Amino acid sequence: MAGTNASAKKKNTKNTVLRVLLYVVVILICLFTLYPYFVTVCTALKSRAEIFSINGTIFPIKAIWSNFTDVWKLAPMSSYMLNSIVIAGGSTLLAMLCGIPAAYALSRMKFKGQTAFLGFVIVSQMFAPVVLLIGIYKVMMAFHLTNSIIGLIFINAAFNQAFAIWLLRGTFLSISPEMEQAATIDGCNRVHALLRILLPVAAPGIVTALIFVFINAWNEYTVALTLISTDTFKPLTVGINIFNGYNMIEWQYLFAASLYAIVPVVILFVGIEKNLVGGLTSGGVKG
C-alpha cells in the first residue's frame, strides 16, 4: 500500500514538473512572438528626436499619443484603409464563391484525373506571387488592370483559391453524405442541399477559410506595390510607405500606421476564435 502511494506521488510530481516546463515554454514562445509588437507600440509613442537619440531606450521617455492622430492628417489613411477593406473583402468573396462549389464537387464527385488535379492545386501554393510578378504584370497590362482595385481583387482571389479549395474540401468530406441523401428524399436537389444543409454544417470550415483568405489579401504587399502607382488606389500596406521618405524615415508615424493595419486582423481573430480550431480540424480530413 505504501509503495503504491509513493509511486502515485512520484507520478504526480513528475506530471507537475512537466506541466510547469510546458507553461514556461509557452510563455517564452509568447514573449518571443509578441516582442516585435511591443517594440512597435513603444516606437509609435516616441518623438522623432527620441527615436534618433543615442541614449534612447525601448520605452518612450514621454508618450506622444498625438502620433496616432497625426498620421491621419499627414497621409490619406482613410482612403488607404477603405481600399484595403474593398480589396480584401472582394478577394475573399470571390474566392469563396468559386472555392465552395469547387470543394464540394471534389469531395462528392469522382472524375478521371481528380488526383492529378488535387496535386496541381497543392503545387500551385508553392509559387509565391513574387516569382510570377513579371507574368502577372503583363497579364494585367493586357486587360488594362494595372492601376485598378479590381485587378488586385482578382490577383488576391486567385492566389488564395487553392488554399480555400483544399481546406473546404476536407470540411465537406467530414460531413456524412447521408445528410444530402435525406435532403434529396425530401425533395431538395443538389444545389438546395448544398445551400440549406451542408453550408450551415460546414460553417466552421468556411469561416476559417474566409479569415485566412481575408488576412492574406489584407497583408499582400508585393503585387500591390508593382501594379498600383496612383495614390488614390493604394491599399494600406503600400500607402504607409509615404512615411518612408528619401531623406528621412518617420519611424513614429510608420509604426503608428502599422498598428492601424494590425487592428482589423486582431478583431477578426477574436471574432472567429471558437470556429478556428474546428475549421482547421475538419479541413484536415483525409480524402
Image (cartoon, helix red, strand yellow):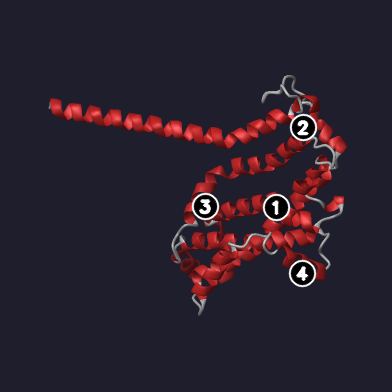
The quadrant of the picture occupied by the N terminus is top left
Residue corresponding to mark 4: 139
* Secondary element at tag 1: loop
Dot 1 corresponds to which residue? 220
Residue under circle 2?
Answer: 252
Q: Secondary structure at mark 4?
A: helix
Mark 4: amino acid: Val
C-alpha distance separating marks 3 and 2: 38 Å
Three-letter amino acid code at disc 3? Gly
Residue 157 drawn above or below residue 237: below
Disc nearer the start of the sequence (4/2) = 4
Q: Residue furthest left?
A: 1
Disc tally is: 4
Residue at image coords 56%, 70%: 120
Residues 78 and 146: in front is 146
Q: Earlier in the sequence, mark 4 or mark 1?
A: 4
Residue 58 in sight in this render: yes
Q: Secondary structure at mark 3?
A: helix
**Residue 75 appears in which quarter of the rendering?**
top right
Q: CA distance from mark 1 to mark 3?
A: 23 Å
